[in-house]
Amino acid sequence: MIDLGVPMSQIILAAEQTVYMVFVSLFLGTILAIIMSVVLVLTNDDGILKNKYVYTVLNTVINIIRSIPFIILMVFILPLTKMIVGTRIGTTAALVPLVIFIAPYLTRLFENSILEVSKGIVEAAQSMGASYFEIVWYFLLPEAKSSLILSITTGTIGLIGATAMAGVIGAGGVGDLALTYGYERLNTPLMFFTVVILVIFVQIIQSIGNHFAYKTRNH
């Protein structure tokens, strides 16, 4: 067996840290992204709740956050991270910048998904007397479900890459393991092993996302 230079327990812990960071931040980021994307769709110039002020402010904030590289964003909001979770370092501390990073990213993807829904569906819902909430919950989101699933899949893969940079604040994870114990110590077998783990992880996520998107589309 190839000597990776670190105990297997450390590799397992790094994998667990990556899974924890990705899925907790994905869950929280998805909730925020759905809310923000719906607000953008409803308040744009063609929306049923047209509001130029709300749309412009939210749109601008999302653009600003998306324009900041994750590594800079993570360091810039350290005071906010400290205020929310009580510490600036560690796996849990990394959740704050990861959520702030992924929420605007998913918002744009979700916005495009919802905008693809036929306006005729919204008009039909309005003619039946549906409330704004009912239009969103029972018409817009279900119709966009397949595209939303693919968007979440894309966001998940993006988060995996971001977790590697989260090692700067001691977040751990597979990416940090590859950088700290692989790259910095010139441990090629470990670097290769971590790359294989990440590739497999991404392939599994993409396959699951494609499967559910296909089932939803053909339901």
Image (cartoon, rainbow, N blue to C red):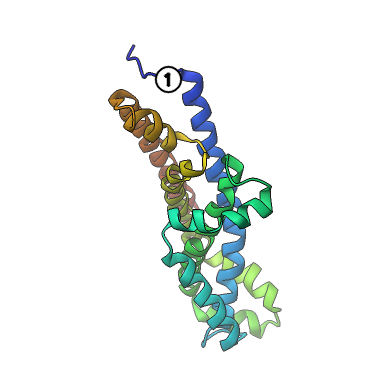
Given the image, on which type of amino acid does mark 1 rest? Val
- Residue at 53% x, 40% y: name it: 171
The percent position of residue 193, horizontal first and vertical second, equals 34, 27
Q: Quadrant of residue 32?
A: bottom right
The percent position of residue 59, horizontal first and vertical second, equals 51, 76
- Residue at 64% x, 68% y: name it: 138
Residue 142 shown left or right of residue 168 in the figure: right
Depth check, front residue: 123 or 41: 41
Q: Secondary structure at mark 1?
A: loop
- Residue at 34% x, 11% y: name it: 1
Q: Which residue is mark 1?
A: 6
- Residue at 45% x, 47% y: name it: 211
Depth check, front residue: 42 or 189: 189
The percent position of residue 110, horizontal first and vertical second, equals 50, 65
Furthest residue in direction top, as rendered:
1
Give above or below for 106 relative to 125.
Answer: above
Depth check, front residue: 155 or 104: 104
Depth check, front residue: 188 or 161: 188
Residue 35 shown left or right of residue 205 in the figure: right
Give above or below for 152 relative to 164.
Answer: below
Density class for disc 1 (Cα within 10 Å; few <14, some 14-19, many ≥20) is: few
The percent position of residue 53, horizontal first and vertical second, equals 59, 86
